[in-house]
Amino acid sequence: MTAAVRPLQLGYVGLSVSDPDTFATFAERVLGMVSVPVQGAARALRMDERSHRIRVHQGERNDLAYLGWQAADDATLDALVASLRVTTTELAADWAHSRGARRVVAFVDPAGVPGELFVVDETLHPDPFVSPKIKGGFVTGGQGLGHAAIRSDVRGASERFYGDLLGLKLSDRITCRAGDIDVDIAFMRTNSRHHSVALAGPIPARMHHMMLQVATLDDLGRAYDRAVRAQVNATTLGRHPNDRMVSFYVRTPAGFQIEIGWGGLEVDDTTWSTTTYDRVALWGHMPVDAP
Ligand SMILES: [Fe+2]
């Protein structure tokens, strides 16, 4: 990785979900996203000015389908593809188009998690984003859509892949025992968001959760109220020690979780130093059993 390569952002996510309609309704009613039609997927979800950020494909995995990493330009995309040292496949133009992209190059990371590098020309939706539920909007822009916690049962290889090849930086680690689980997570960033990807342990699925950040504490609180009323909150409110995010987790109809957060810190590369934390929460995030 050379210093000339500009940072990526987690630009889009694809999901494989057995009941896309139920999932999209959940995303609208609980998360405050906006469902829109899209080519090449059953449903798509908007959360900002982009045409969409999440594509919901009909499929039986009930898991992540792919993470989309947006490169700043063609030269960055080409440099990254040349460095990846794994098999890459450039998607046909109409497939790229269906993702709101001009070029898409697909790959699979060392732990088997599919990814796509892409560049866009114009991805704005003709209508401004207005969520009836998230009045202050989601925090995206240059920080990308949020973060994803993904499987990494070959930790060294995954860290080298995302770090040395895709250019992400290690922000910190959490290693501890939580209940009967040994937690060992590496948090990696590609812009000022504390982490765009968290490399978790040998989890059975590709993705444990993805995180969406709202801009106001009131929107977080109202989302929490909606989740509690719908009996889908997987945890209580809590705060992580490393990214300082106040958040809670919801169980989606597809099984994986979504974290809704507020107040995550932004990393300044010039002053940041990497630490290892020994707990996953400063307070809260207590598990809530499904009803
Ligand atoms: Fe998270």
Image (cartoon, rainbow, N blue to C red):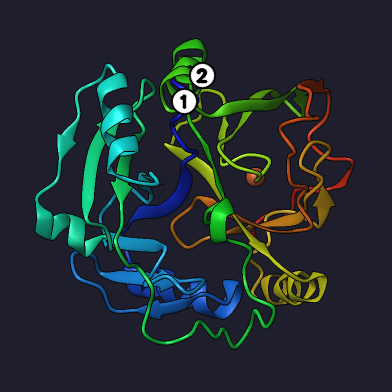
Evaluate whether residue 159 shows in this view.
yes
Residue situated in front as seen by the camera: 196 or 58: 196
Q: Tag 1: residue type?
A: Tyr
The residue nearer to you, when weighing 62 against 120, is 120
Picture quadrant where residue 213 is located: bottom right
* The disc label shown at residue 159, or none: 2
Q: Residues within 10 Å of mark 2 (few under 14, many from 20)?
A: many
Q: Residue 162's mark? A: 1
With 157 as the anchor, is 17 left or right in this view?
left
In the rendered view, tell whether residue 93 sits above or below residue 232.
Answer: above
SS state under label 2: helix
Which amino acid lies under the numbered mark 2 shown in the image of this protein? Glu
**Relative to 270, is 77 on the left or the right?**
left
Q: Is residue 291 visible?
A: no
Q: Is residue 116 above or below residue 204?
A: below
Q: Quadrant of the N terminus?
A: top left
Which residue appears at 48% of the width and 46% of the height? 9
- Counting from the top left corner in percent of width and height, residue 170 is at 63, 24
| Residue 66 placement: quadrant | top left
167 up-or-down from 265: above or below: above
Tell me whether circle 2 and circle 1 mark residues in contact (CB < 8 Å): yes
Q: Position of residue 79 (x, y in %)?
A: 30, 28
